[in-house]
């Protein structure tokens, strides 16, 4: 495996050098350390650092001997790497292990979750931007909102000012800044198109790096959200997360690898037509788009117009059926194991999710996809903030 070229905004400190197996940067998405991966000699130390950090991130405190067994690295290599990571402020000694047998107890080491901070921004809200300061284990220690500044030039300055304010309040070294934004975003953090922000072909990652002098990662909000579900929410390696709000988008993992697409628009299912029988007119001008059926504003309006509880359940089941129609080809083609829904629980959980499952099962190969799961995320409204933090962890430390 060869290492990627360092992306713009790479940390000036050795502690934050991109990993040779950084999942987000390479699209590897590896949750657990992989042993026996072929690594070029010039990348071995970076790879081994990431292997140690990944092991501690998911397994918690352990001794140096435990680390050696878990990673397959020699005790001498582990000793050197742990000393280096302690000096970099990424790992800390946590005291000795309690044992009942004779002999000197082992000193435990663990990721220093509070020694650095990650700044995250979620720009996907219809009326506000959300920002957070997180520890390395995804805990949000500061959460703030600012009003949506509207589209155009004002939006960029608002984003930069918001990020600068959060960095100033971090009170610990900042590992990096992660941003989840609506729209189509390329691998370099350029927002190719984001109508809700009024941005087209804008290098948001570059603008933030120039303003903050910190590593920055920018991605589509649904792509960030599915990473949060994978790292913190227990999702499997083959999953689609459907994010419902003002619009509808999705993030995809196949074999644990983020799918971005040839034009960086993988998962843009909101404007897939799911009706040949007419239906609501979408904001894009077409009739019958998925977004016109299941976006939060559309669903809320149709529920408000329903005459009674039975009619409201019918609205939700109809929307769930349309979602199942859109997802069935995706589930079938990629052999996905689960569908995760993110958005207003009162709209998505219950009849809508149940109808989506029923439709999926009738429109996919029963013997293969009978066990497909459709569930709500437990990450709540902060899923994009936490996903943006995962992008930083992945790119800077090789941890996911």
Image: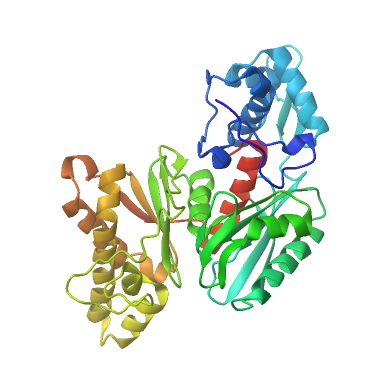
The reply to whether residue 182 is visible in this rendering is: no
Q: Quadrant of the C terminus?
A: top right
> Residue 18: image x %, image y %?
67, 36
246 vs 140, nearest the viewer: 246
> Residue 272: image x %, image y %?
31, 64
Question: Please, which colouring scheme is shown?
Answer: rainbow
> Residue 387: image x %, image y %?
56, 52
Left or right for 265, reference 350: right
- Counting the numbered discs, the total is 0
The reply to whether residue 196 is visible in this rendering is: yes
| Quadrant in the rendering for residue 70 | top right
| Quadrant in the rendering for residue 80 | top right
Residue 298 vertical position relative to residue 261 in the rendered view, above or below:
below
113 vs 42, nearest the viewer: 42
Residue positioned most to the front: 201
Residue 313 vertical position relative to residue 182 in the rendered view, above or below:
below
> Residue 340: image x %, image y %?
39, 54
At 42% from the left and 39% from the top, the residue drawn is 237
Residue 108 vertical position relative to residue 134 in the rendered view, above or below:
above
At 76% from the left and 14% from the top, the residue drawn is 104
25 vs 313, nearest the viewer: 25
Q: Quadrant of the N terminus?
A: top right
At 62% from the left and 57% from the top, the residue drawn is 179
């Amino acid at each position: 495996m060869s290492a990627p070229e360092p992306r713009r905004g790479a940390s000036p400190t050795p502690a934050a050098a991109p990993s040779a197996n950084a999942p987000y940067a390479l699209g590897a998405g590896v949750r657990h350390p992989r042993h026996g991966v072929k690594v070029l000699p010039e990348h071995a130390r970076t790879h081994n650092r990431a292997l140690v950090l990944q092991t501690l991130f998911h397994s918690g405190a352990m001794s140096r001997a435990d680390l050696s067994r878990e990673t397959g690295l020699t005790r001498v290599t582990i000793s050197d790497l742990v000393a280096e990571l302690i000096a970099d402020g990424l790992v800390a000694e946590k005291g000795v292990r309690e044992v009942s047998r004779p002999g000197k107890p082992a000193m435990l080491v663990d990721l220093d979750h509070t020694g650095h901070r990650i700044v995250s921004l979620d720009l996907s809200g219809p009326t506000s931007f959300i920002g957070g300061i997180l520890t390395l284990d995804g805990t949000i220690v500061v959460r703030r909102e600012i009003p949506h500044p509207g589209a155009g030039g004002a939006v960029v300055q608002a984003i930069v000012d918001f990020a600068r304010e959060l960095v100033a309040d971090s009170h610990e070294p900042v590992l990096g800044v992660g941003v989840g934004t609506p729209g189509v975003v390329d691998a370099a953090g350029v927002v190719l198109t984001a109508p809700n922000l009024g941005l087209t072909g804008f290098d948001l990652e570059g603008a933030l790096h120039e303003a903050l002098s910190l590593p920055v990662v920018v991605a589509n909000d649904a792509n960030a959200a599915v990473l949060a579900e994978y790292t913190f929410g227990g999702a499997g390696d083959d999953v689609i997360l459907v994010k419902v709000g003002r619009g509808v988008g999705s993030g995809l993992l196949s074999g644990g690898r983020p799918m971005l697409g040839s034009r960086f628009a993988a998962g843009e299912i909101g404007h897939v037509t799911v009706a040949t029988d007419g239906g609501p007119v979408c904001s894009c001008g077409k009739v019958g788009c998925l977004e016109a059926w299941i976006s939060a504003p559309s669903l809320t309006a149709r529920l408000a117009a329903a005459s009674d509880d039975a009619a409201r359940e019918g609205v939700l089941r109809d929307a769930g059926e349309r979602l199942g129609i859109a997802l069935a080809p995706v589930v079938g083609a990629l052999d996905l194991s689960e569908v995760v829904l993110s958005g207003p629980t009162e709209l998505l959980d219950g009849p809508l999710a149940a109808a989506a499952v029923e439709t999926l099962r009738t429109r996919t190969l029963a013997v293969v996809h009978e066990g497909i799961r459709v569930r709500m995320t437990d990450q709540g409204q902060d899923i994009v903030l936490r996903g943006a933090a995962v992008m930083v962890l992945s790119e800077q430390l090789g941890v996911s």
